[in-house]
Amino acid sequence: MKKLLLSGLAITLAAPAYASGSGFNLNNTNFVVTVSFLLFVGVLLYLGVPKMVGKKLDDRAADIRNEIDEARALQEEAKSVLVSFERKRKEVAEQSAAIVAQAKEESELAAKVAKEDLKAVIERRLKAAEDQIESARDAAVREVKVKAVNVAIAAASDVMAANMAAKDANGLIDAAIKDVGAKLH
């Protein structure tokens, strides 16, 4: 079938060479070019070059289609990764805001506790100072009382020694000691 088609094509294309009236003359350049072209096309067809070219083009088209599909898949993956990162960024921003808020609350609470602790410490120190002052005042009063008693005893003993007999003096000393003991306790 190919040979029949090829010979029909050769005759049709060689028609201008016959029209010049010279027939199969190799000096006729139109005829030589036509025959050479037909032979070239015939050799290409015989060797299956159009099938090879078509297969190469089909393979290239398939490669391009695969690359486009792969690029689309990568694009979709990139979009999903971008969405994921955006979501994670939002979550991190929310978490950091929550952490900052919690830290602020904790610092305010710690400041409040520190103020209360400081207030308690100041109150304890004031109470301790008041207790020390009270203790010192009580000690001073006792010391004054002891000295007053000692002075009174010394004065009374001087007066009594000058005015009393020994028997009466011993009775007064005993009474004074009991009186002082009762007042100190």
Image: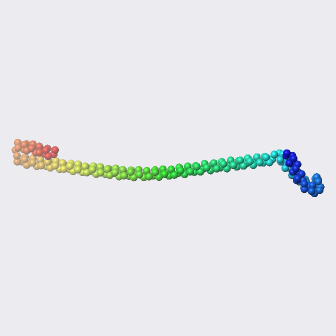
Question: Residue 55 placed where, x, y %?
Answer: 76, 46
Instruction: Estimate the x, y position of residue 88 in percent, counting from the top left.
Output: 53, 49
- Residue 74 placement, left or right of 25: left
Residue 52, x across and y down, in percent: 78, 46
Give the total of numbered labels.
Answer: 0
Query: Which color scheme did the rendering employ for the protein?
Result: rainbow
**Res. 182 visible in picture:** yes
**Quadrant that contains the N terminus:** top right
In front: 135, or 83?
A: 83
Does residue 162 appear to the left or right of 90 in the view shown? Answer: left
Q: Which residue is more in the foreground, 92 or 29? A: 29
Give the residue at x 87% y 46%: 3
Say if residue 35 shows up in the picture: no
Instruction: Report the side of 25 relative to 154 (left or right).
Output: right
Q: Nearer the viewer, residue 60 or 173?
A: 60
| Picture quadrant of residue 15 | bottom right
What residue is rendered at 90% in x and 53% in y? 14
Q: Is residue 39 toward the left or the right of residue 158 in the image?
A: right
Q: Residue at x 36, y 52 (%)?
A: 112
The location of residue 153, given as percent across then percent down, is: 11, 47
Q: Quadrant of the C terminus?
A: top left
The residue positioned farthest toward the bottom in the image shown: 20
